[in-house]
């Protein structure tokens, strides 16, 4: 009985080694021929001012990378721990940039960001007096 157990264990080990080697070689060969991963889209955001009076107009502008020209970007504001889309959006231009005119009425520090094309920008802070 002990001989049978050893023979089975040896056979399974050999079978594992024989089947694992071609799989590892195929995986290594396949990774060399695969196309490089697509670059991730990204957005930048800047505000033209750091502080404004309530309902005073200012601009949020920035650029995009790896996002097709004409892609819609939308301004979002952090309200009660949730990002809310504001009625300020536009399509990016052929230079992969955008420039939004914005008016805010919530007094205090407002946190803003831009979303679009599968990307989210950095957070911009604007104080409303």
Image: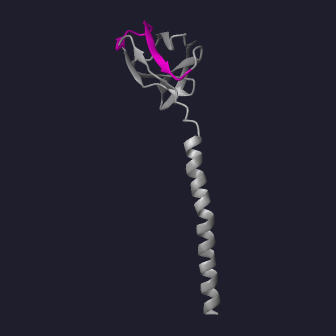
- Check if residue 63 falls in the magenta segment: yes
- Which image quarter is the C terminus in? top left
| Residue 84 image offset from top left, x and y in percent | 54, 25
Report how many numbered discs are placed on residues in the image: 0
Is residue 109 among what the camera can see?
A: no
Q: Is residue 75 visible?
A: yes
Judge from the rendering whether residue 54 lies leftward or rightward of residue 38; answer left or right: left
Instruction: Look at the picture and state if 28 lies above or below 87.
Output: below
Magenta stretch: dominant secondary structure: strand
Residue at 61% in and 59% down: 22
Q: Is residue 55 left or right of residue 36?
A: left
Q: Quadrant of the N terminus?
A: bottom right
Quarter-wise, where is residue 57 in the image? top left
Identify the residue shown where x is 50% and y is 27%. 120
Q: Nearer the viewer, residue 122 or 55?
A: 122
Vertically, is 87 above or below 32? above
Q: Position of residue 88 (x, y in %)?
A: 54, 13
Q: Position of residue 15 (x, y in %)?
A: 63, 71
Q: Is residue 37 left or right of residue 44?
A: right
Q: Which residues are magenta?
A: 50-67
* Residue closer to the observer: 57 or 36: 36
Magenta span contains residue 43: no
Residue furthest bottom in the image:
1
Nearer the observer, 8 or 116: 8
Relative vertical location of residue 63 with respect to residue 79 in this rendering, above or below: above
Q: What residue lies at 43% left-to-right and 25% top-to-bottom? A: 122
Q: Position of residue 93 (x, y in %)?
A: 54, 10
Q: Residue at x 61, y 57 (%)?
A: 23
In this view of the protein, which residue sits in the foreground, 4 or 106? 4
């Amino acid at each position: 009985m002990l001989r049978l157990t050893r023979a089975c264990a040896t056979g399974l080990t050999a079978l594992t080694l024989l089947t694992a080697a071609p799989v590892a070689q195929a995986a290594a060969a396949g990774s060399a021929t695969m196309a490089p991963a697509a670059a991730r889209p990204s957005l930048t955001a800047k505000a033209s001012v750091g502080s404004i009076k309530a309902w005073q107009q200012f601009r949020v502008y920035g650029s995009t990378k790896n996002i097709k020209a004409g892609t819609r970007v939308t301004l979002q504001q952090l309200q009660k721990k949730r990002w809310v889309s504001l009625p300020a959006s536009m399509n990016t231009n052929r230079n992969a940039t955008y420039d939004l005119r914005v008016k805010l009425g919530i007094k205090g520090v407002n946190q803003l960001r831009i979303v679009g094309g599968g990307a989210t920008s950095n957070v911009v802070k604007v104080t409303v007096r």
